[in-house]
Image (cartoon, rainbow, N blue to C red):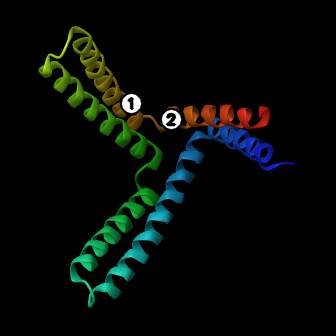
Amino acid sequence: MDLDKSAGIFFIILGLIFILFPMFSTGLVSVIVGLSLVFFGISAIYMGYTLRKENMVAAIIILLIGLISLILGLLFIFYIDAISFLVAFEFYIVGFIMIIFGIAGLVSHASKISTFTSILVLLMGIVAIALAVFASNNPIFLATVIGIVLIIEGISYLIN
């Protein structure tokens, strides 16, 4: 069996797990992300500690990154749902950027088409922020959406 077919079957099985067991799958993703951040944080703290004699500024920056990673990793393992947090964070960033672009387009008054486009971008930014609020409050919905996307991706691998 070639690699694409194996990946397609894996994605379909993973998608079904996300749909059938949403709380387990989101919890597992949080633990995996958390452990990754904890190990990264520990290695960054060690690297920053060993760099302190050569380049103090770089050592402090790396130590801070390591400490932040370690704290976020522990939060993801024990408290925060990583999927909801990360997806909501992405939607917030996209939403705010779209709102800023929309307002900038409205202020520039380039043409009627650009004004219409700016209004659409502004509205889509507001929708993105609303989705961020929804995503942060409902990890089961996100797990189901991720499961559906994984199944679709798996089917596309099997068809090709």
Q: What residue type is labelled 1?
A: Phe
Q: In this view, does 123 lie above or below 146?
A: above
Disc 2 to disc 1, C-alpha distance = 9 Å
In the foreground, 85 or 125? 125
The residue under the point 34% across, 32% down is 133
Q: Name the residue under label 1.
A: 134
Spot occupied by residue 108 in the image (x, y as percentages of width and height): 13, 21
Q: Say whether disc 2 or disc 1 marks the residue closer to the N-terminus.
A: 1
User: Farthest residue toward the bottom?
Assistant: 53
Residue positioned 79% across, 47% down in the render? 6
Looking at the rendered structure, the secondary structure element under dot 2 is helix
Mark 2 is surrounded, within 10 Å at the Cα level, by few (under 14), some (14 to 19) or many (20 or more) other residues, namely many
Residue 66 position (above or below residue 149):
below
- Going by the image, does 114 lie left or right of 152? left
Badge count = 2
| Three-letter code for the amino acid on which mark 2 is drawn | Leu
Compare residues 74 and 94 and report the one nearer the observer.
94
Rendering quarter of residue 42: bottom left
Q: Residue at x 50, y 35 (%)?
A: 142
- Residue 17 placed where, x, y %? 67, 42
- Which disc, if any, is residue 142? 2
Mark 1 Cα-neighbour bin, 10 Å: few <14, some 14–19, many ≥20? some
Which residue is more in the foreground, 46 or 80? 46
